[in-house]
Structures are given as structure tokens and as C-alpha cells.
Image (spheres, rainbow, N blue to C red):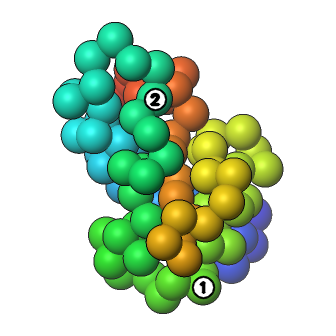
Amino acid sequence: MSKTSQAYTIRKSNMLNALARLCSARMSSFEGARLPPPELWPKTREMADQCDENIYTTRTLLLTLVKEGKVYISSRPINNSLRWFICTERISRKPQ
């Protein structure tokens, strides 16, 4: 694996772990519900701030995670921002 692809994989992993932490915190107030409403999912900007990435890189990494089946994306922008949530199977596992 090249250094570039290794760095990309690490950044994706960091993004996934940060999203898992944010989603777990938001799930705690929605007992019994499968997922909170998309309006409460983390925004792209929140994720960028958590991971110290720019918003465009963050969106690209998150879209890759969506394609890999690891992250859900809101069906439309909410207040001009896409929202993200970790796939429910991953919520039960603690982030590293």
C-alpha cells in the first residue's frame, strides 16, 4: 500500500470514529428509536471541525464511507447542509 493510500485510509478511519462518537451521543436521547431524525444528525461542518479537515475533504471522505455502506447520508440537504449518521450496526460497537 502506498503512503498516500495509507494516509487516506487513516483519515477515513478517523472520520468514521469521530462520526461514531457523535452519533452515539445523539442516540442516547432516542431510546427505542432506530435512528434520530436527520435534522439531528451531525452536519458536514461539525465533522470537519471534529477531524480538523476542510469541509470539502470531509464531504469526500464521508461520501466514500457512504459508498462502502458504513455511513448514512440525509436524502436532501437540511438547512443547506448534508447530514451524516453511522450505520446502525456500527453504533453498538464502541469507537476506537
Q: Place residue 1 in its image quadrant.
A: bottom right
Q: Which residue is mark 2?
A: 35
Residue 56: horizontal and vertical position, in percent? 60, 85
Point out the tag, 2 or 1, that comes first from the N-terminus: 2
Residue pictured at 53% horizontal, 22% vertical: 89
- Is residue 29 rendered to the left or right of residue 52? left
- Is residue 41 rendered to the left or right of residue 2? left
Q: Is 13 located above or below residue 82 in the figure?
A: above
Q: Amino acid at mark 2?
A: Leu
**Residue 51 appears in the picture as rendered:** no
Residue pictured at 75% horizontal, 45% vertical: 68
Q: Is 62 located above or below residue 54 in the figure?
A: above
- Find residue 4 and name its label: none
Residue pictured at 40% horizontal, 57% vertical: 42
- Is residue 68 rendered to the left or right of residue 61? right
Q: Residues within 10 Å of mark 1 (few under 14, many from 20)?
A: few
Residue 70: horizontal and vertical position, in percent? 63, 40
Q: Which residue is mark 1?
A: 56
Q: Amino acid at mark 1?
A: Tyr
**Residue 32 appears in the picture as rendered:** yes
Residue 59: horizontal and vertical position, in percent? 61, 73
